[in-house]
Image (cartoon, rainbow, N blue to C red):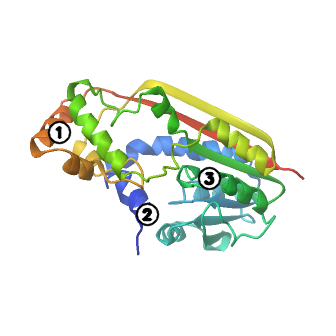
Amino acid sequence: MGTDRWASWLLRHRDGGSAGLRAQFAPQLTDYRDGVLDRATITPGDTVLDVGTGTGLIGLGALERVGPHGRVIFSDVSPALLDECRRQADPDRSTFVQAVADDLSPIPDTSVDVVTTRSVLIYVARKPAAFAEFHRVLRPGGRLSIFEPINSFPVRTGRNTVLGLDPAPIADLITKIRAAYAAAAPAADPMLGFDERDLVRWADEAGFTGVRLDYRAEIEVPGLPITDWAAVRRTAPNPLVPTYGKVLDAALTPGERERFDAYVESQTAVPTRHTMATAYLSGTRAG
């Protein structure tokens, strides 16, 4: 199977190839899946288009809800991830389409009952165009249900921590790591230039009615401690930047890396702390 940055992250660098980290993330991913699907109000016989399907978290869940006469279209920019979905999905009720969220031209007008996405628009520069495409492919009365992290929130509040660690004891090293990640990020970062109000506005401007936003913000919320630092070093925060290990190797001297590693490993009994915001948005194409 060929690979690309999207497949590499979802299949390897999101959890560092660690079964322990995968199990740790699983409950949260299940919650996100159910949150999107519940708001989509899928009924048996529906055709669901899952945009940016990834490894099929939402699309495979939708197959369970559309019943024997329904259908799911798995759409993604990555051929490798579509191959991954093919291995798991029912071929008689599934279609696989390579497309980007802001150009769904392989999907005909008014051809689907539901459009879903999860953590896709953060990577799309032309977000209003994506909403216009979601509206175009939906039948009258069709439903949109999406989930997005609002990554601008921790930045705006000044609490964008590295790994959820208390930065005070290693503030000098954190500064170097932040600078390295900033240099590695895209020049025009689509993940930071919007918030929940923009999602509502874009949905409204695209023509959706009955738009609902469920927004949650958390500040300094305790999380699980880092108990497998070797595995976490192999992970990356998102598909567009290197793993923590690669950044540490590039940003720090050998002595600094040793000090950073020692600090993280001394925190295995200390909960991490995270500041984040998330948004579920749903709407309907008018009949």
Quadrant (top left, top right, bottom left, bottom right) of the N terminus = bottom left
Up the image or down, 40 lies above or below 279; here it is below
Q: Residue at x 90, y 53 (%)?
A: 287
**Image location (x, y in percent) of residue 4:** 42, 67
Q: Amino acid at mark 3?
A: Thr
Q: Residue furthest left?
A: 255
Mark 3 or mark 2: name the one nearer the start of the chain. Answer: 2
Whole-percent x and y of residue 79?
50, 72
Residue at x 62%, y 53% (from the top left corner): 117
Task: Please tell me which of labels 1 and 3 falls first in the chain.
Answer: 3
- Compared with 270, 182 (above or below) is below
Disc assigned to residue 261: 1
Residue wearing tag 2: 7
Which sits in the foreground, 19 or 186? 186
Distance from the alpha carbon under mark 1 to that under mark 2: 28 Å
Q: Is residue 118 left or right of residue 179?
A: right
Along the viewing direction, whichever of 17 and 171 lies nearer the viewer: 171
Label 1 SS:
helix
CA separation in Å, label 1 and label 3: 37 Å
Q: Position of residue 42 (x, y in %)?
A: 74, 51
Whichever of labels 1 and 2 marks the residue nearer the N terminus, that label is 2
Q: Residue at x 29, y 46 (%)?
A: 180
Residues under numbered marks 1 and 2 in contact, where contact means CB atoms less than 8 Å apart: no
| 105 sits left or right of 287 in the view | left
Q: Amino acid at mark 2?
A: Ala
Q: Secondary structure at mark 3?
A: strand
The amino acid type found where label 1 is placed reads: Asp
Q: Secondary structure at mark 2?
A: helix
